[in-house]
Image (spheres, helix red, strand yellow):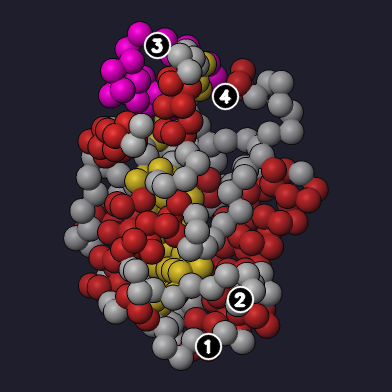
Amino acid sequence: MDGSKIFIAGANGQLGTALRQKYPNAQSADIDQMDITNRDSVLGYNWSNIDAIINAAAFTNVDAAETPEGRVAAWRVNAQAVAHLVEAAQVNNLTLVHVSTEYVFDGTKDNHAVNEPYSPLGVYAQTKAASEIVAGLTPKHYIFRISWLIGEGHNFVRTMMGLAEKNVSPTVVADQVGRLTFTPTLVDVIDHALRNQIEFGIYNVSNDGDPASWADITRLIFEYMGRKDLKVTDTTTAEYFASKPESSPRPLKSAMDLTKIKSSGAQLSDWHSELKNYVDKEMEKK
């Protein structure tokens, strides 16, 4: 895949940043050049030298999506904008790569299958389920459903490391269980799909390894930082959000069946080793 023939939507987010590192010659557009929430803006873009659109754009503030303003924004960015990209892909015979989330499931199963029926809990989750349905209308599409993304930008690991630097022993939810997805792994999967032209469709993607809770992941972060002196207190999701009635419901079980993506030949490293590498690199920056 010629990187110069890739268009990245949402190029400045965690995933977009990693994609730009992988494809330095890829095309992207700021809001003045193209607004993906505006159909005319998307269809009016010059797609003549593009082979694939990678949609890394999303409204991801799950709690804000429960507010009147956030609900509108979430649907506009996560669903309507995808429909515009789908139309552009259809008209110009492009491949669409769309990134979704395990939030499309209610989190009641230990291991979510690729073909599990949709059961989204909150507004954000509902918009992402809708985005998958819309993206699937593109003849040539890859939908990569991920969990717990960690990359360059604001994320859980950096937040916990920041607390450690302030000598804070946090209380962390212990009943949400899943696997981390590091952006280099996701980018490699996307590149694998485009270069090898694997079968179009939906794939579950995360790093490999045994699932763990956010509390246990925090303990590992502190261990890798050499801060075993800090204590992590377990709490439940219900207890954590008891004083925040406006918050969005979260799926408790986020682990997904990775068989399909592995069978395509994609390599998924263990999230434990990727977490250790991530923490080491973050500490080197200090």
Quadrant where the image shows the N terminus: bottom left
- Left or right of 146? Residue 266 is left
Kind of residue sitting beneath label 3: Leu
Is disc 4 surrounded by few (<14), some (14 to 19) or many (20+) residues within 10 Å?
Answer: some
Residue pointed to by mark 4: 237
- The first of marks 3 and 4 along the sequence is 3
Tag 3, which secondary structure? loop
**Is the Cβ of the residue at disc 1 closer than 8 Å to that at disc 4?**
no
Q: Position of residue 207 (x, y in %)?
A: 30, 44
**Where is residue 23, by image quadrant?**
bottom left
Residue pointed to by mark 1: 46
Tag 1, which secondary structure? loop
**The magenta segment:** 212-237
Kind of residue sitting beneath label 1: Asn
Q: How many marks?
A: 4
- The first of marks 2 and 1 along the sequence is 2
Q: Name the mark on residue 230.
A: 3
